[in-house]
Image (cartoon, grey):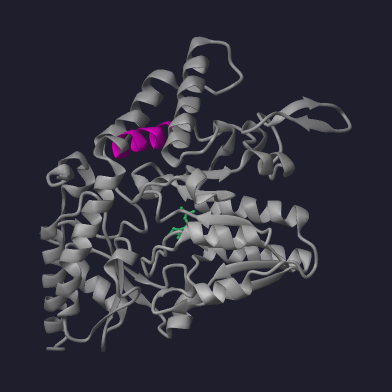
Amino acid sequence: MLEGIKNEFPVLNQIVNDEPLVYLDNAATTQKPLSVLSAIKDYYENDNANVHRGVHTLAERATEKYEAAREKVRAFINAKSTKEVLFTRGTTTSINWVAQFAGQILKADDEIVISIMEHHSNIVPWQEVAKKTGAILKFVYLKEGELDMEDLRQKVTAQTKFVSIAHVSNVLGTINPIEEISKIAHEQGAYLVVDGAQSTPHMAIDLQKMDVDFFAFSGHKMMGPTGIGVLYGKEELLNQFEPIEFGGEMIDFVYESHSTWTELPWKFEAGTPNIAGAIALGAAIDYIQELGIDQIHQHEDELIDYVMPKLQNIEGLTIYGPKDNKKRSGVIAFNIEGLHPHDVATALDMEGVAVRAGHHCAQPLLNYLDTPATARASFYIYNTKADCDKLVEALQKTKEFFKLD
Ligand code: PMP
């Protein structure tokens, strides 16, 4: 159903190293369709003005479009209200904000529970807040590429104040059972933070159903631009916490001695926001909605079901993550015995195939998996079965080139 969609992504229509580009680095960032590119251009050509302050026509139009984008995000993730949707620079900023909220209430010996499959941006902010408050950071480990739920149940206790877990791992592709984790966290009175960077672009997100307290994601991983992301927080929680940044836009009154804050969501959005970025994220959401998020998910499932047996047939190739394809999204980390993943990625690039190699900002996970690095292919809506074939063929050529066959 999504075949032919590539034409809507100008960057994909190019030759790299004498081969047509096959872009398989979507977990790092995704390409942008024409509709998103023209939303950015249209905004700067027709509406550019600062938001919320002006009474002139352009300022009103820019404000309307910026706030309309917030409503699109709200509907997309099924938040109760736009008061719960804060625009940030991306997942990293969003999680840093939550960790700083945590810093406003954590005490020595309170506990924070995260997992070993987290991206650095869901580890380091918690390490820092633990250092400052004396809270204890605990890790949940894995069982066959999946979160060990028994371990999670044991680690989340009455001392736990925050549980912060990726919805989907950017290395293993594992889809974590957020509703179940939510029940476990809430039974112990802990808040649940979810890193949705790798799930929001690929599957339907219903935050009310999942009962998540905070949820973070990035625009650039879902066909929007870089520099825009979202932090969702339940309204009653966001009301309890102090802003992280201070300045214009977020105040109610400023006196010489002190200031008061405006209402949600603007209380957290100090300074001129990324207006074009938010509007373009709204356009990306429109695009996803037109295709249908369930269709996108199904398309990626089909690609995984198609490519996995072919990859498993390549001798010496190890695939990380869950055995059951239904428990993983379109991210495949792998290694070829006897080859450094950087060499694999370089050889694939010579064939026009773009994959990532390295630690994928998940050093504790790779350490746990006992490998310094992996190669990683990650899929999105514009990828095709022909792209999968090209990946497999290029891997075979790589093995031949390095005389591994
Ligand atoms: N969490 C996960 C699971 C990710 O994959 C990424 C991006 N690789 C991030 C967080 C950080 O996102 P950003 O760099 O857009 O802030």
Position of 369 compared to 213: left or right? left
Q: Residue 281's x, y, as percent?
A: 40, 37
Q: Residue 279's x, y, as percent?
A: 42, 31
Q: Residue furthest top?
A: 56
Residue found 68% across the figure and 58% down from its top: 189
Residue 87 shows in this picture: yes
Position of 52 compared to 222: left or right? right
- Judging depth in this view, the residue of 400 and 185 nearest the camera is 185
Residue 23 shows in this picture: no
Q: Residue 150's x, y, as percent?
A: 53, 76
Residue found 40% across the figure and 64% down from its top: 170
Q: What secondary structure do most residues of the magenta stretch adopt?
A: helix
Q: From the viewer's perspective, is residue 320 above or below residue 161?
A: below
**Residue 44 falls in image quadrant:** top left
Q: From the viewer's perspective, is residue 136 above or below residue 201?
A: below
Q: Which residues are magenta?
A: 279-288
Q: Residue furthest right?
A: 257
Residue found 49% across the figure and 32% down from its top: 70
Q: Residue 67's x, y, as percent?
A: 50, 26
- Judging depth in this view, the residue of 131 and 255 nearest the camera is 131
Position of 381 compared to 388: left or right? right
Position of 25 compared to 180: left or right? left
Residue 280 part of the magenta-drawn span: yes
Residue 324 part of the magenta-drawn span: no
In the rendered view of the protein, which quadrant contains the N terminus? top left
**Residue 145 falls in image quadrant:** bottom left
**Residue 175 falls in image quadrant:** bottom left
